[in-house]
Image: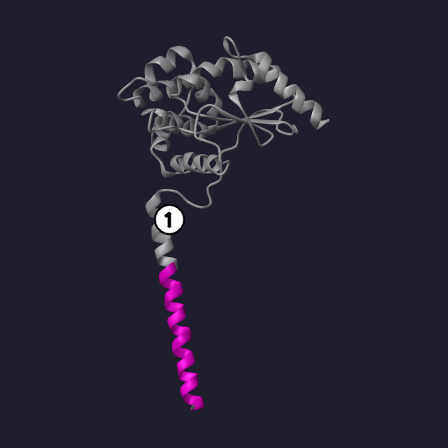
């Protein structure tokens, strides 16, 4: 075969491959922007307690979930008791199919985090009197604006962040992180040092128990020594 013909054929093949690469890049870019999420988004890192601890308790929670709300005061006591020795972390797992305001609650918490007040909004949303109001509302956002005001947030920024793609990305990243665990979606779900911790081990006859949490954490701390 003529060498000149082969050279021309090679140029055509390389040029065609380049067109495919460019088109694929454009398609991938369009697909990424259309979903409202980005591959660069990592799971949230909302941490309290000892950030350097070898023992980490992660809670995946849903702000509208009544079981999560019942766990909240117990988890709060546990955090206070082990604040100096355990790293506590909260991630979003809104079960929107059964809790219509769950995603809105997660958005409010993440929007507050953009002004450095995640845990304050987290606590406000789970506060019993507040929870009864916003979780059953047809439009919970006015309550969130009220909470943002009481926390001293820039309300205009809060309302803008609440609706933002950046906040959506955070929540979706947490959902993706949970999916990788292989556990069934349910809230609250706890992981102790990366291992699933059954709620059956965290309750007694009266519900969630500080003593039950303590037993699990004490064992983990002892193993970490």
Extreme residue toward the right, this view: 225
> Relative to residue 54, is residue 143 drawn left or right?
left
| Horizontal and vertical percent position of residue 48 | 56, 24
- In the image, residue 42 above or below residue 195: below
- In the image, residue 71 above or below residue 47: above
20 is within the stretch colored magenta: yes
| Horizontal and vertical percent position of residue 61 | 45, 25
Q: Residues within 10 Å of mark 1 (few under 14, many from 20)?
A: few
Residue drawn at x 44%, y 46% is 39
Pick the residue in front: 75 or 83: 75
> Relative to residue 115, is residue 202 drawn left or right?
right
Magenta span: chief secondary structure: helix
What residue did someone put label 1 on?
A: 32
Residue drawn at x 58%, y 17% is 213
- In the image, residue 56 above or below residue 126: below
Choose top left, top right, bottom left or bottom right for residue 50.
Answer: top right
Choose top left, top right, bottom left or bottom right for residue 89.
Answer: top right
Residue numbers of the magenta segment = 2-24
């Amino acid at each position: 075969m003529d060498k000149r013909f082969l050279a021309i054929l090679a140029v055509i093949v390389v040029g065609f491959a380049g067109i495919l690469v460019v088109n694929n890049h454009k398609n991938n870019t369009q697909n990424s922007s259309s979903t409202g999420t980005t591959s660069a988004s990592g799971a949230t890192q909302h941490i309290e307690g000892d950030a350097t601890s070898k023992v980490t308790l992660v809670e995946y929670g849903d702000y509208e979930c009544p079981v999560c709300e019942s766990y909240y005061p117990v988890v709060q006591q546990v955090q206070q008791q082990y604040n100096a020795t355990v790293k506590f972390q909260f991630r979003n797992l809104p079960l929107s199919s059964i809790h219509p305001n769950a995603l809105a609650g997660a958005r409010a918490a993440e929007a507050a985090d953009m002004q450095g007040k995640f845990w304050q909004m987290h606590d406000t949303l789970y506060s019993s009197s507040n929870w009864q109001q916003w979780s059953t509302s047809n439009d919970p956002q006015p309550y969130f604006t009220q909470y943002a005001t009481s926390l001293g947030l820039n309300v205009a920024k809060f309302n803008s962040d609440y609706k933002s793609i950046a906040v959506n990305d955070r929540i979706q990243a947490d959902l993706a992180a949970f999916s990788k665990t292989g556990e069934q979606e349910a809230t609250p779900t706890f992981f102790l040092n990366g291992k699933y911790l059954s709620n059956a081990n965290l309750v007694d006859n009266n519900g969630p128990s500080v003593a039950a949490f303590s037993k699990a954490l004490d064992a983990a701390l002892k193993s970490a020594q």
